[in-house]
Amino acid sequence: MTLLLIQQLTDTAKHLADTTNHAVTTAALPTEELRFGDLLLKGGWVMIPIGILAVLGLVIFFERYFTIRKASRNESNLMVQVRSSIHSGNLESAIAICRNSNTPLGRMLQKGLLRIGRPIKDIEGAIENVGKIEVSKLEKNIGILGIVAGIAPMFGFLGTIAGVIKIFYDISKTDNISMGVISGGLYVKMVTSAAGLFVGIVAYVCYHVLNMMVDKVILKLETDAIEFIDLLEEPSK
């Protein structure tokens, strides 16, 4: 009787151990991971224009960023050299210094120096006209970033509509409302919406960052232009 009881307890323990090992093995099986690239592909054809907008926005941002940054570098040395040349009466040297600087401020001062001898109003007008041209050069293509910021979310919304259409189409074909049937449309809907919003937000931020940089350059050019006009009026004081 004792041997029979021990045998039953042993069989029960082995059964419990087998069950536990099976559960642990099942839990240890690796689940299939969804890669980022595969997730983007599930967005469908709408991801193509969103991707093009993203690349276009990045190219414009970095190209304008480095251009504006170059134009905004400190030109205090240029003003010192121009002031020194004007005080010494060497106008040609001042013009050469401005020409060799190859900066928006240098081109503005060069135009003003070439107008010396005319009324101050004419010199101010010439500098202002060159300044407007230089600012328009800095603002080139920045508006495209604003367009990208507005269009990208619209493409995301278009992808949402396409995903909903796909869901109803799949249901009409299979006559089955299950997660497996509607998951394809949900992927299109969610991925395109997220991608469109992300690209739009980044483009919106980049657009305003560049505009703030341009505003700083404009303020600096205006300040230096006023200083230059005061410099020209000093001999007449």
Image (cartoon, helix red, strand yellow):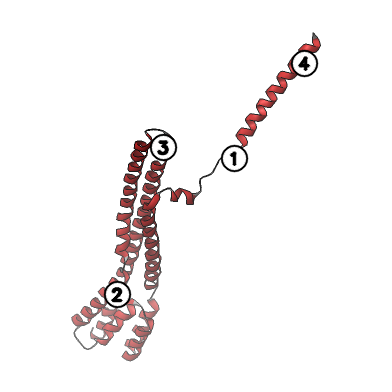
Alpha carbon of mark 4 to alpha carbon of mark 2: how far?
A: 96 Å
Image disc number at residue 30 = 1
Q: Which residue is mark 2?
A: 134
Residue visible at 39% across and 45% down in the picture: 188
Q: Does 148 sit left or right of 21 as displayed?
A: left
Q: Does 50 sit left or right of 23 as displayed?
A: left
Three-letter amino acid code at disc 2?
Glu
Say whether disc 4 or disc 3 marks the residue closer to the N-terminus.
4
Q: Which element is circle 1 on?
A: loop
Residue 228, image quadrant: bottom left
x, y percent for residue 100: 38, 84
x, y percent for residue 121: 18, 80
Q: Which residue is mark 3?
A: 181
Q: Which element is circle 2 on?
A: helix
Marks 3 & 2, CB-CB < 8 Å contact:
no
x, y percent for residue 155: 32, 52
- Callout 1: 10 Å neighbours few (<14), some, many (20+)? few
Alpha carbon of mark 3 to alpha carbon of mark 2: how far?
A: 58 Å
Closer to the camera: disc 3 or disc 1? 3
Say whether disc 3 or disc 2 marks the residue closer to the N-terminus.
2
Say whether disc 2 or disc 1 marks the residue closer to the N-terminus.
1
Say whether disc 3 or disc 1 marks the residue closer to the N-terminus.
1
Alpha carbon of mark 4 to alpha carbon of mark 3: how far?
A: 51 Å
Residue visible at 35% across and 54% down in the picture: 200
Image disc number at residue 7 = 4
- Callout 3: 10 Å neighbours few (<14), some, many (20+)? some
Q: Does 215 sit left or right of 3 as displayed?
A: left
Q: Which element is circle 4 on?
A: helix
Three-letter amino acid code at disc 3?
Val
x, y percent for residue 175: 37, 33
Residue visible at 51% across and 48% down in the picture: 35
Q: Residue furthest front?
A: 173
